[in-house]
Image: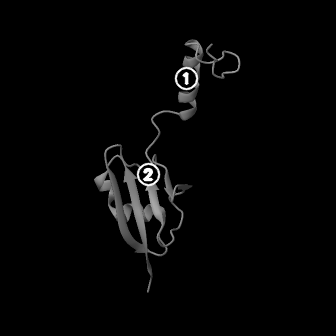
Amino acid sequence: MESKISVEVVYGTPTSQKIIEIKVDAESTIENAIKDSGIISIYPEIDLTVNAVGIWNRAAKLTDMLNDLDRIEIYRPLLADPKEVRKRRAEKAKEEGRANKITGGRVKLL
């Protein structure tokens, strides 16, 4: 007799969030649990070849085995690279005179 464990599968958009609690076989993988949860039918934009996944905010692989009470999170792709956004913001500040052109530090106003 195979034992069952309880897990949560979580996905959110800017306007909604879904947490699905399910019981899966103790030998289940993250991918198995996501498919068993039915969350892909609720959010058809989820593509497991594109979306990253994690357990309790730590990156994981679809093939990772689950433990009882794990929280599987499906992450949306980033719309913008955070490094590029910071770089553009710093360049704009330099152009506007709000940052030192050499060090990048804030300009002291007298």
Return the residue nearer the eye: 59 or 27. 59
Q: Residue at x 66, y 21 (%)?
A: 104
* Amino acid under disc 2: Leu
Label 1, residues with CA under 10 Å away: few <14, some 14-19, many ≥20:
few
Note whether 95 is above or below 50 in the view shown: above
Note whether 22 is above or below 103 in the view shown: below
Expressed as whole percent of the image width and height from the top left, the position of residue 65 reads: 53, 67
Q: Secondary structure at mark 1?
A: helix
- Check disc 1 and report the residue beneath it: 88
Q: Residue at x 44, y 82 (%)?
A: 2
Q: Which residue is situated farthest in the bottom direction here? A: 1
Return the residue nearer the eye: 85 or 53. 85
Q: Which residue is situated farthest in the left direction here? A: 42
Alpha carbon separation for disc pair 1 and 2: 31 Å
The numbered dot on residue 10 is none
Expressed as whole percent of the image width and height from the top left, the position of residue 100 reads: 66, 17
Q: Residue at x 33, y 57 (%)?
A: 39
- Check disc 2 and report the residue beneath it: 48
**Quarter in which the N terminus is drawn:** bottom left
* Amino acid under disc 1: Arg
